[in-house]
Image (spheres, grey):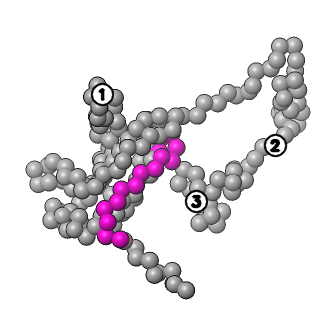
């Protein structure tokens, strides 16, 4: 039986992965081969991550505008981009800044789309002439001067147990 350290940490490939985590959050990860790290070291060693948003164009290819550029700490191999526009297409590149100030891309991702922002209605509309029971809603009761609706109300912990990996929080790994 193989031990837990039998798999290599890196496979000496150039990999760029990109996943939406919600309407305004995407997760990017990358791995650079030894030769790409040599290129980065020859250019000063600083690796930059650039995030681009796709915009519609009249041609066949998408046009991209630079949204953000970050310089993650050395050894970083992933990044969360927050506060993005919902229902939009993005891609990212890993690269280095050349001595003349221009950006030299080393590896890039495929284009992904963030989901649209959720739309919620506070309460379903009641049928005319009927109460909340006719609309399928539980009747409220008054407790301590406040209306309390009888019925299921899942706690945050229950929701997190049912959806252990949501928005970057893995409750199974943290033991919560």
Residue 125 located left or right of residue 87: right
Residue lying at 66% horizontally and 63% vertically, measured from the top left: 176
Question: What residue is shown with label 3?
Answer: 170
Residue lying at 42% horizontally and 43% vertically, measured from the top left: 112
Observer able to see residue 70? no
| Range drawn in magenta | 11-25
How many marks overall? 3
Spatial CA span between label 1 and label 2: 48 Å
Q: Residue furthest left?
A: 100
Observer able to see residue 146? yes
Residue 118 located left or right of residue 146: left
Residue 141 located left or right of residue 36: right
Name the residue nearer the viewer: 155 or 129: 129
Disc with the residue nearer the chain's start (2 vs 3): 2
Image coordinates for residue 12, horizontal then vertical, percent: 31, 70
Spatial CA span between label 3 and label 1: 38 Å
Mark number for residue 152?
2
The answer to if 21 sits in the magenta stretch is yes
Image coordinates for residue 5, horizontal then vertical, percent: 46, 81
Name the residue nearer the viewer: 11 or 131: 11
Please rate how many residues cluster around mark 1, counting C-alpha atoms within 10 Å: few if below 14, some from 14 to 19, many from 20: few
Check contact, mark 2 vs mark 3: CB within 8 A: no
Image coordinates for residue 99, horizontal then vertical, percent: 11, 54
Residue lying at 74% horizontally and 27% vertically, measured from the top left: 123
Q: Secondary structure at mark 2?
A: loop
Question: What residue is shown with label 1?
Answer: 57
């Amino acid at each position: 039986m193989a031990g837990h350290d039998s798999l290599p940490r890196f496979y000496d490939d150039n990999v760029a992965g990109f996943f939406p985590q919600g309407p305004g959050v995407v997760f990017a990860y990358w791995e650079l081969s030894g030769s790409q790290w040599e290129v980065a070291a020859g250019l000063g060693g600083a690796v930059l991550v650039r995030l681009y948003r796709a915009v519609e164009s009249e041609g066949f290819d998408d046009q991209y505008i630079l949204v953000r550029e970050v310089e993650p700490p050395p050894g970083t191999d992933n990044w969360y981009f927050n506060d993005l526009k919902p229902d939009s297409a993005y891609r990212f590149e890993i690269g280095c800044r050349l001595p003349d100030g221009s950006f030299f891309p080393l590896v890039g991702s495929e284009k992904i789309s963030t989901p649209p922002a959720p739309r919620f209605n506070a309460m379903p509309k009641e049928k005319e002439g009927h109460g909340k029971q006719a609309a399928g809603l539980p009747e409220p009761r008054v407790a301590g001067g406040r209306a309390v609706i009888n019925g299921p109300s899942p706690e945050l912990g229950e929701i997190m147990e049912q959806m252990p990996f949501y928005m970057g929080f893995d409750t199974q790994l943290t033991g919560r």
